[in-house]
């Protein structure tokens, strides 16, 4: 059985049965729909209920009857469209797309949020993290580094932090701590915690016992660790504390050295606006809270996936270092200056014909559309006029509404300066170009209408599960999720 999402009207839900109508030209939407299929039924704002297809009849109109099998709290589409794994639904905003078939993974994700809708708004508040994580997923192995060396370090700290070990440690045991931290190794000798023993050994022991097991909140313990004149030991600054808090609490805290702190401030405007008001302890506490409340951990597991068996925050550290090194404030988020005015131009997805040779397609530098016997599409002022002429010219009972509507858009709605993503039949983007000619009707018989295009990028970018449309030409200018997703992966530097 298949699963679908269908857009109707909430007023249709008056009983446990819904009658839904489509015009005959919309048959292509539901060609594979069968009785018994699962349907998420929604209006223009919310998913309202889950149904099962009862009957499909066709006579002048397509009539689908649905049995309501589950009702619950409405699930807002404005949030659902932004969820990773469901951004395919962004295309659902196009008014003439009323039905979409869902993949099994999409059904699983959507059903999980239907059951527990409360987390959806929080997840999409930071949906821009999805793109960063997606781009990082393609290079994650490079940033993960030497996991064997890291495993040794975690094992050291796991033994170090046990109270029974700390309570009997001698000076030589504490000196071993330096070998595990590059920041402790580079501390100036005059300030070094390890140059010589500067207090009774009991104070060193209590220093870490209070940090690990003290009664105060963790932010106060960190501040005390750093600046309390009675407890503080010389040689531990903000960098050292920012690293130690991760290794001492690896399942609860990221590393917070300068790089990670700057990365958090670039990712979260809340961090950058409050950074000057925080002590070191409250900064670490609140920045970690931001990471938690943004669902960064959940998003990482969903989009990137575990790459090691080390504590998960080690992998989050690597992601934050990636953000620090690749997203400087002057880089314009990886997009080229030419795209700063994207709201002034339209963006399209053009799907090539099956089996087309990509090399010759790019060499020709043209987008083409077969007009058949319809002739110059400039002669038609509306889609309806094209449909009526098609019936007369071909003596046809069935009109290819999708293809002829796209042909009208290709002639009348696409403009010079618009941008086009070219998609093949394997759900791959193979090029991005800029339209550089008006609609052109060929001089030679049986040749297609065409527009010239200047290529900006060519290559192969997999977008399976992220973009859907059976139309050969789709205007996605208003679909910001899909547009941002495509620009980020194709214009990545």
Image (spheres, rainbow, N blue to C red):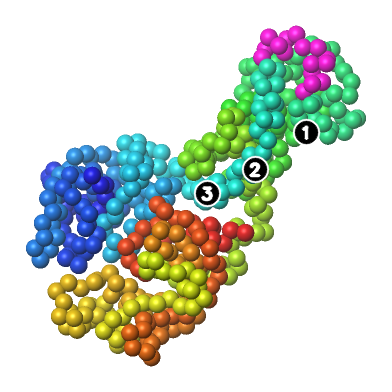
Report which quarter residue 278 is drawn in: top right
**Which residue is denoted by mark 1 in the rendering?**
182
Report which quarter residue 403 is drawn in: bottom left
**Which residue is denoted by mark 2 in the rendering?**
143
Gap between marks 3 and 1, in whole Å?
30 Å
Looking at the image, which is closer to me, 492 or 308?
Answer: 308
Residue 475: x and y in percent read 39, 68
- Tell me where the magenta segment starts and ends, as one range: 162-177
Which residue is at 63% across, 47% downward?
A: 323
Pointer 2 with pointer 1, Cβ within 8 A: no
- Mark 1: give few (<14), some (14-19) or many (20+) Cα within 10 Å: few
| Quadrant for the N terminus in the image | top left
Q: Secondary structure at mark 1?
A: helix
**Callout count:** 3
Gap between marks 2 and 1, in whole Å?
18 Å
| Quadrant for the C terminus in the image | bottom right
Which SS does the magenta portion mostly show? helix
């Amino acid at each position: 059985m298949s699963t679908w999402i269908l857009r109707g009207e909430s007023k249709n839900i008056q009983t446990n049965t819904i009658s839904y109508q489509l015009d005959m030209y919309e048959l292509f939407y539901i060609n594979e729909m069968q009785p018994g299929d699962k349907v998420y039924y929604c209006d223009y704002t919310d998913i309202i209920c889950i149904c099962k297809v009862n009957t499909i009849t066709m006579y002048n109109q397509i009539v689908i009857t649905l049995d309501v099998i589950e009702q619950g709290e409405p699930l807002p589409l404005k949030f659902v469209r932004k969820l990773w794994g469901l951004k395919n639904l962004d295309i659902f905003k196009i008014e003439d797309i009323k039905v979409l078939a869902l993949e099994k993974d999409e059904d699983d994700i959507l059903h999980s949020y239907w059951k527990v809708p409360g987390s959806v708004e929080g997840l999409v508040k930071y949906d821009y993290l999805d793109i960063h994580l997606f781009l990082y997923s393609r290079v994650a192995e490079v940033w993960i580094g030497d996991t064997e060396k890291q495993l040794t370090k975690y094992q050291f700290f796991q033994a170090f932090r046990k109270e029974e070990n700390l309570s009997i440690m001698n000076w030589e045991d504490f000196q071993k701590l330096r070998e595990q931290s590059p920041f402790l190794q580079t501390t100036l000798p005059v300030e070094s915690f390890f140059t010589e023993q500067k207090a009774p050994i009991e104070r060193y022991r209590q220093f870490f016992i209070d940090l690990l097991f003290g009664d105060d909140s963790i932010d106060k313990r960190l501040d005390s660790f750093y600046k309390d004149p009675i407890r503080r030991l010389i040689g531990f600054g903000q960098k050292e504390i920012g690293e130690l808090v991760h290794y001492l609490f690896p399942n609860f805290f990221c590393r917070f050295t300068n790089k990670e702190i700057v990365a958090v401030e670039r990712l979260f405007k809340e961090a950058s606006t409050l950074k000057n008001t925080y002590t070191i302890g409250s900064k670490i506490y609140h920045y970690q809270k931001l990471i938690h409340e943004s669902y960064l951990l959940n998003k990482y597991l969903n989009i990137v996936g575990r790459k090691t068996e080390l504590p998960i925050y080690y992998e989050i550290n690597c992601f934050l270092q990636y953000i620090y090194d690749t997203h400087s404030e002057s880089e314009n988020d990886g997009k080229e200056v030419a795209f700063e005015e994207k709201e002034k131009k339209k963006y399209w997805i053009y799907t090539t014909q099956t089996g087309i040779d990509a090399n010759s397609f790019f060499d020709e530098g043209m987008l083409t559309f077969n007009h058949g016997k319809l002739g110059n599409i400039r002669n038609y002022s509306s889609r309806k006029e094209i449909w009526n002429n098609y019936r007369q010219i071909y003596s046809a009972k069935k009109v290819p509404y999708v293809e002829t509507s796209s042909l009208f858009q290709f002639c009348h709605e696409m403009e010079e300066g618009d941008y086009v993503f070219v998609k093949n039949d394997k759900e791959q983007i193979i090029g991005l170009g800029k339209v550089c000619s008006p609609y052109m009707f060929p001089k030679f018989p049986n040749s297609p209408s065409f527009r010239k295009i200047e290529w900006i990028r060519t290559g192969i970018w997999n977008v399976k599960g992220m973009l859907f449309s059976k139309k050969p030409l789709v205007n996605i200018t208003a679909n910001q999720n899909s547009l941002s997703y495509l620009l980020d992966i194709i214009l990545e530097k």
